[in-house]
Amino acid sequence: MAEQEHQQASEQVNELAQKMEEVILGEDGLPLSKKALKKREKELEKEKKKQERLAREAEERAAREAAEVDHGVDNYGRSAINMSREKTETKWTALGELTAEMAGQLVNVQARVQGSRPVSGKMCFLVLREGVETAQAVLSVDADTVSKKMVKFATSIPNESIVSITAQVVKPDVPVESCTVGTVELQVRKVFVTSEVKIPLPFALEDAMHSEEACARDATLNRVGLDTRLNNRTMDLRTITNNAIFKIQAAVCQLFREYLTNEGATEIHTPKIISTASEGGSNVFKITYFKGAAYLAQSPQLYKQACIAADFGKVYEIAPVFRAEDSNTQRHLTEYVGLDLECS
């Protein structure tokens, strides 16, 4: 008898719990009224019909696109990895070589996609970048070459991907002020992705180009931290600022070399791993050299003087210098490129 009563009580508890689960509570934690329940049912029904309509429209759109003849199917896509197996006779034009005098010509360019901007389903713009040069490319649907699917493909190319493009050079009505090559525009005829970015970028390249002064003036600008830059150094070096630093460094060395060579000086290359400490030995790095010890040269002075004594007349060297000098500032002498010269 007790077991039967216990079973009946359990069934009643379960039934009550089930009913409580079916009760819908409002924001105040209390059960909704009949009026509120009816309103909620109408909203749910409305949302259900909306989702069904959107799904139906998506299916119809997909069906139309599938039935549509893609007349540009051979003019876009993803190129297979070449791996140097095939040598093409394609003549490539650098973005920096494009001029207004080339208007009407067909050119082939290889560059990174810095950004894309769709105008509609029939037109989009691409910003191409090669080194520090940028140019604008445009895809516009026509009857022969560019299709809607081709435009859609171009807008889906991830930023920083490398593309190969065949395009006609045209002179825009208004110069393109947002690009370094502003006197011309590229009307795309073919676009193929040769190296596609597969993962999200750690930061936008435009953000990495903001100076500290600009970020201090405008708090809305995104600032890329130093750690993020160094952890993604390859991408950080793509910025125009960093690219320019290396170009300036190369130009200084080139001018130094050209001037001294024209003056009759001979460029020499001195050892950097030496067996004994040079220049007194108090500020040199000691390293392990196989089973013994060696030192990093802190100056080519000894070798320059030896060349002068050997009647070289004038000598110079552009090479790294290593000095074991601790520093309390961001400027240090532990490793730098030295421009050394010696004359008799």
Image (cartoon, grey):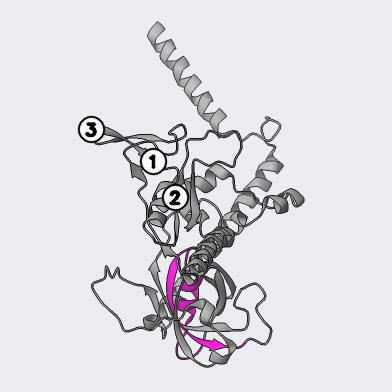
The percent position of residue 159, horizontal first and vertical second, equals 50, 63
Q: Which residues are magenta?
A: 142-171
Q: Residue at x 36, y 82 (%)?
A: 74
Tag on residue 320? 2
| Label 1: how many Cα within 10 Å (few below 14, some 14–19, many 20+) | many
On screen, residue 165 above or below 2: below
Q: Position of residue 139 (x, y in %)?
A: 53, 80
Is residue 222 rendered to the left or right of residue 189? right
Q: Please, what secondary structure does the residue beneath circle 1 have? A: strand
In the drawing, what numbered circle is on residue 217?
none
Q: Earlier in the sequence, mark 3 or mark 2?
A: 3
Three-letter residue code for mark 2: Pro
The residue wearing badge 3 is: 291
Tag 1 residue: 296
Q: Circle 2: is it few (<14), some (14-19), or many (20+) Cα within 10 Å?
A: some
- In screen coordinates, is 313 left or right of 174? left
Distance of label 3 from label 1 (alpha carbons)? 16 Å
* Label 1–label 2 contact, CB within 8 A: no
Q: Amino acid at mark 1?
A: Leu
Residue drawn at (47%, 71%), measured in percent from left and top?
111
Nearer to me, 272 or 75: 272
Q: CA distance from mark 1 to mark 2?
A: 10 Å
Are the two marked residues, 3 and 1, in contact with CB atoms closer than 8 angstroms? Answer: no
Amino acid type of the residue tagged 3 in the rendering: Lys
The structure residue drawn at horizontal position 48% and vertical position 49%, both measured from the top left corner, is 232
- How far apart are the two marked residues, 3 and 2, measured between alpha carbons? 25 Å
User: Earlier along the polypeptide chain: callout 1 or callout 2?
Assistant: 1
One can see residue 318 in this view: yes
